Every structure is written in C-alpha cells, then in structure tokens.
Amino acid sequence: MSPTGMQIPVAKPLLDEQEIDAVRRVVLSGWITQGAEVAAFESEFAAFVGASHACAVSNCTTALHLALKVVGVGQGDEVITVSHSFIATANAVRYCGAVPVFVDIEPDGFNIDPSLVEAAITPKTKAILCVHQLGMPCDLAQIVEIGRRYSIPVIEDAACASGSEVLWNSQWEKIGRSHGDVACFSFHPRKLLTTGDGGMLTTTVAEFDAKFRLWRQHAMSVPDTVRHGSQRVIFESYPELGYNYRMTDLQAAIGRVQLIRLPGLVSKRRRLAEQYRDGLSRIEGLTAPVEPSWARTNWQSYCVTLPDWLDQSKIMQALLDRGVSTRRGVMNIHRESAYADPHSHRIAGHLGRSIAAQEKSIILPLFAQMTESELSFVLESLQQATSTLSRSVSRLVG
Ligand SMILES: *Cc1c(COP(=O)(O)O)cnc(C)c1O
C-alpha cells in the first residue's frame, strides 16, 4: 500500500475554506446566477492570461461551440482537428452542423502534427481547432502561420491549459492571449483551476466577445443585470437564436479563489513532474513526456509512453493492486460509436500515432497536494510492475 495506506488518486482538486467563504458571500448577497462575480472573474482571468477579452460560460464544450460559431463554422463546413482528444473537441464541431477532419499527432507528443494540417485543407475548411492536450501547448507558431496564410481562423481548445505558457516572439506568454483567434478553457475538476463545471472564452477581437455575451444569455438584447438595476421599465428582445450557456456567480466566486492559487499549483506540478522525469529515466522501457523548448506546460496530466512489450491494462492493474490509480492515454474520438457514421467525420491520412498513443500510454497520479513520498511510491511501483511484467514476457518468448 501507499505511504499513507490510502489509494493515490490520479487527480484531486485543491479546495478549502477560502472557496467556502467565497460561496457564502455570494449566497448571502441574494444574487447567485451570472452577475458581478462572473464579471470580476472575467476581468481577473483576462488580466492573468493577458487577453483583451474574457467571457465566462457554463463549460468548455459550450465555449468551443460559440468559438466555432463566431468564426462562421456552419452546416457542411470542415474543421481540422485531432481525433486524439476528449470527445467534446469534435462534438462541438458537429453542433455547428460541420464535419471534424482528423489529422494525426506528432511523433514525440500528444499534440496535432502541424506538418499534416496543410494537406487536410479543402475549400470547405472554415477553422483549425488545435488542442493543447493535457496542458502541453501545441505548436501554435506553425499552426497560426498556416491559418494566416490560408485565411483560416484558429481556435484553441485550451481546456487543460490554464496557466500553461508558450514562447512567442521571444517572450513567455500565457496560453489564452489568445494566439489563435479564440481560446477556450475548461474549469472541470480534472483541470487545474476548477469551478465544478465552467468555461472561459478569451480573444483579442471585441466583436467576437460581444457575440459570446449575447449568445450565452439567450441572445437577450438587455441582460437581466441591467434591467434589475434600471430606474426605468425596459423590455428586452431576442434578435437571434441564443443559448443558455451561463456561468453562475457561485461558480465564478470559486473561480476567483482558484485563479489566485493557479500559479502556485503550476509550479508545484512542475516540481513533481521533474521528480517523475528523473525517476523514469531509471526505469527501463518507460518514456517520459517531452516538453518542447518553446513550451511551459502546467502538467494537467503526466502521460508516460509504454514500450511495445508492456501491456497497458496489465500495468494499470499491477499499479492499482498497490493502491496507485492511473488512466489510459487520451482517447481517439473516431473509434467511438458516436462517430461510427462515416459522414460524421473525415480522416485525413493515417491516425496510427493517435491509436498507438491511446493504447501505449498511461496517465500517472499528479496533483498539488501530492507528497514526494507518494510520488516515490508511484515510481517504485512502476519499477516493480515493469520488471515483473518483463520477466513474464521473457518467459513467454524464451
Ligand atoms: C475537458 C476537456 C474538454 C471539455 O471540457 P468541459 O468543461 O468538461 O466541457 C474539451 N476538450 C478537452 C481537450 C478537454 O480535456
């Protein structure tokens, strides 16, 4: 068993009395849905990432839907993205009536391979939806350059990337300024900054931000906050089709506390990840994830690649038997039944690396409260499991 005799979870949000105090303040204020707290969270988040605009929504999936819609993605259009992502990435494309076009990932990482993007472009391509998978920035410089050259907007699925950074014109900048046209964040508990559920759209384009604000609130011409504060009777109107994609003030109040914690969470995770990298270099067969020189990840997940001879479910079971939770590598969207209809998507080239990444990688426990001894125990368990499993393989072969 682990040092504490407890199961080591794969992830764990950091929440305490400060979040409780924040929610208490909101409950007692009498205004609990989208209001002053959401507005404050938006301006604090915008300042944090260096964006001119930030609009809070109910989650990252709804953020992706609005981002694709604002750049004009509609019925029959194509959006270039990856299959190797959480299913919401491609689902948002389908909400617009468009077709996700899947390209493969890089040889030494879990992000879109920029060298495959150009070949996937057709006259129907209306956006490139790149993902900063597991918090690791994708190669934005190359993708944004391709987008500019073909006049195709770039949307960043930054669901996992709160607090991650990219080297941009020789300066470290936060993911979300945004470097593409719009960046979309998630505040689900599996990400670093959590509000339970929640999302954020950041952009430098004022007109996009105005559209997000309209659409998230039923496309209501005059928001309830304005009517509430008015001394004159105002009737609202609904000029176009909108949605209810609001974040509540309860969530935003938690988010504001979490945002203050975020830099500390990132540096703690980066220290733990270094300890993993050192330890993994001494375990035969396992490959630590690579951080490119132009990226500073928040290590939302720490995903290790297994050698061919090591069975994914066997090693995960061996770790679980010792109280260490893991998860398989990121899924592939095109392999799910929801994508069985060949008209639901298009595959550009091969997805061999995406499939290998799903089957030959595992996500190790990593969370801010994790102790060095817990991390050493994970490494020791990996060492033991790989050597036991390699002996059984060599017995079979020999
Ligand atoms: C978590 C995640 C989403 C969905 O975020 P929600 O806030 O749960 O809607 C989308 N894309 C990626 C890559 C994710 O990891």
Image (cartoon, rainbow, N blue to C red):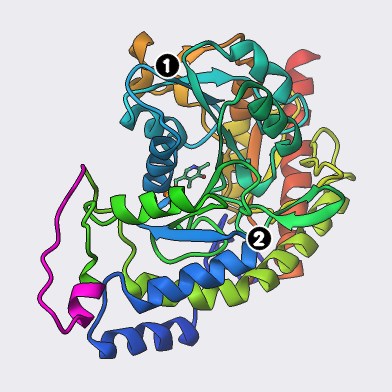
Q: Could you say where residue 336 lies in the image, as x and y percent from the top left?
A: 40, 23
Question: Magenta residues?
Answer: 226-240
Q: Position of residue 170 (x, y in %)?
A: 87, 50
Relative placement, left or right, of 334 versus 246 is right
Residue 79: x percent and y percent? 48, 24
The magenta stretch spans residue 211: no
On residue 345, the disc is 1
- Residue 232, magenta (yes or no): yes
Describe residue 204's horizontal placement relative to residue 164 as left or right.
Answer: left
Disc 1 packing (10 Å; few <14; some 14–19; many ≥20): many
The amino acid type, in three-letter code, at marker 2 is Gly
Query: Which residue position holds label 2?
Result: 163
In this image, 278 relative to 10: left or right? Answer: right
Q: Classify mark 1: helix, strand or loop.
A: loop
Determine whether label 1 and label 2 are within 8 Å by CB. Answer: no
Q: Distance between the residues labelled 1 and 2?
A: 31 Å
Mark with earlier residue (1, 2): 2
Prevailing SS of the magenta stretch: loop
Residue 206, above or below 386: below
**Quarter holding the C terminus?**
top right
Three-letter code, disc 1: His
Residue depicted at x 68% and y 70%: 263
